[in-house]
Image (cartoon, rainbow, N blue to C red):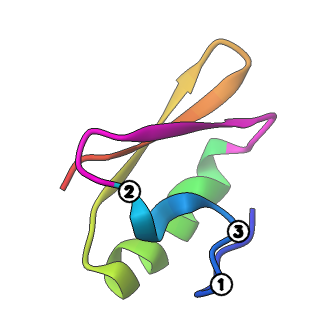
């Protein structure tokens, strides 16, 4: 998983309640990345395992 200001994933443009899926992702890695992303963007994202993917949702 990669995050930078160029926006590999749509974190910067997501509204509250919007989400996307990442296939075959390690949820622990995502949680660690979210610590940085949440601080940099002043937003809050939640990662949840769903079937064979991880759903990322903006909650705040």
Q: Is residue 18 above or below residue 43?
A: above
Q: Secondary structure at mark 2?
A: loop
Q: Please, which residue is most extreme toward the top here?
A: 51
Q: Is residue 6 above or below residue 8?
A: below
- Residue drawn at 38 percent across, 56 percent down: 14
Label 3 and label 1: CA atoms lie apart by 6 Å
Question: Mark 2 vs mark 1: which is more N-terminal?
Answer: 1
Classify the position of the N terminus by image quarter.
bottom right
Q: Is residue 43 magenta?
A: no
Q: Please, which residue is most extreme toward the left here?
A: 60
Disc 3 packing (10 Å; few <14; some 14–19; many ≥20): few
> On the picture, is 56 further left or further right than 1?
left
- Residue drawn at 65 percent across, 75 percent down: 3
Question: Which label sits on residue 14?
Answer: 2
Look at the image and give the residue range highlighted in magenta.
15-26
Classify the position of the C terminus by image quarter.
bottom left
- Residue drawn at 75 percent across, 42 percent down: 25
Label 2 and label 1: CA atoms lie apart by 14 Å
Say how many tags the image has.
3
In this view, the residue in front, 55 or 11, is 11
Q: Secondary structure at mark 1?
A: loop
Q: Is residue 16 magenta?
A: yes
Q: Secondary structure at mark 3?
A: loop
Question: Mark 2 vs mark 3: which is more N-terminal?
Answer: 3
Which residue in the protein does label 3 denote? Answer: 8
Question: Which label sits on residue 6?
Answer: 1
Q: Position of residue 51 (x, y in %)?
A: 65, 12
Disc 2 packing (10 Å; few <14; some 14–19; many ≥20): some
Label 2 and label 3: CA atoms lie apart by 13 Å
Q: Position of residue 10 (x, y in %)?
A: 55, 60
> On the picture, is 30 further left or further right than 43?
right
């Amino acid at each position: 998983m990669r995050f930078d200001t160029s926006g590999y994933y749509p974190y910067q443009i997501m509204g509250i309640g919007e989400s996307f899926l990442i296939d075959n992702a390690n949820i622990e890695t995502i949680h660690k990345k979210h610590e940085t992303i949440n601080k940099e963007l002043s937003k809050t994202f939640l990662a949840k395992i769903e079937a064979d993917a991880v759903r990322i949702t903006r909650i705040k």
